[in-house]
Amino acid sequence: MTPAINLVKKHKIAHRVHEYAHDSSSESYGLEASEKLGVPADRIFKTLVVDLDNRSLAVGVVPVSAMLNLKLFAKAAGAKKASMANPADVERSTGYVLGGVSPLGQKNRLKTVIDSSAQQYATIYVSAGRRGLEIELSPTDLQELSNGLFDKIHL
């Protein structure tokens, strides 16, 4: 069990865990998950950690088929500017390894913004805290568990 899975179980959230054999030569963890699970890339969301104004970290959750727009993210998070966080800071703050960062069960709960496109689906997939492991749950449950907000953060 990962901290993300433990969190959804603790809160009795309806979910499904999907596991697949991760290929370490894969160039995109999210697109690999989409292909191996047979799920459209728009329903699989990646977790990106961002540095806000060089002072604090925050999480952006966007479809793997899209790119995070740092200007839109900064605005949604109430910051002037945003940049991708240093990988070592990401792992230290979340407790997860890159490619397995989940928006749930992080060591330090970070401000979270979920792309509003998630709301069009009954369920979406996010990392369950390990490469090759996804958790399927409703966008609303993800928003509530992460104390996140919905906003458009990709173009």
Image: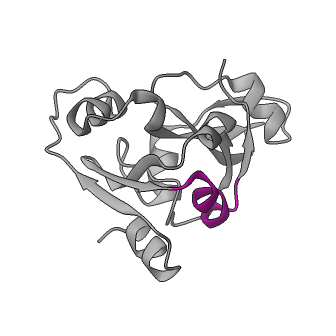
Q: Residue visible at 69% across and 62% down?
A: 147
Q: Measured from the top left, where is residue 85 in percent x and y?
A: 57, 37
Tell me residue 119's x, y (percent): 64, 43
Say if the magenta span includes residue 74. no
Horizontal and vertical percent position of residue 117: 63, 34
> Left or right: where does residue 88 sit relative to residue 85?
left
Q: Is residue 149 above or below residue 38?
A: below
Q: Residue at x 31, y 33 (%)?
A: 34
Residue depicted at x 53% and y 57%: 93
The image quarter in which residue 83 lies: top right
Which residue sits at x=64%, y=57%?
140
Which image quadrant: the N terminus?
bottom left
Q: Of 90 and 62, which appears nearest the observer?
A: 62
Is 63 placed above or below 145 here? above
Tell me the magenta residue range: 138-148
Give percent across and percent down for residue 152.
73, 31
Q: Nearer the viewer, residue 155 or 51?
A: 155
Q: Main secondary structure of the magenta part?
A: helix
Q: Is residue 100 left or right of residue 65?
A: left
| Magenta-drawn stretch contains 147 | yes
Q: Specify the quadrant of the image occupied by residue 30.
A: top left
Q: How is the image coloured?
A: one colour
Residue 65, compared with residue 18, is above or below; it is: above
Q: Quadrant of the C terminus?
A: top right
> How many numbered marks have been drawn onto this rendered protein structure?
0
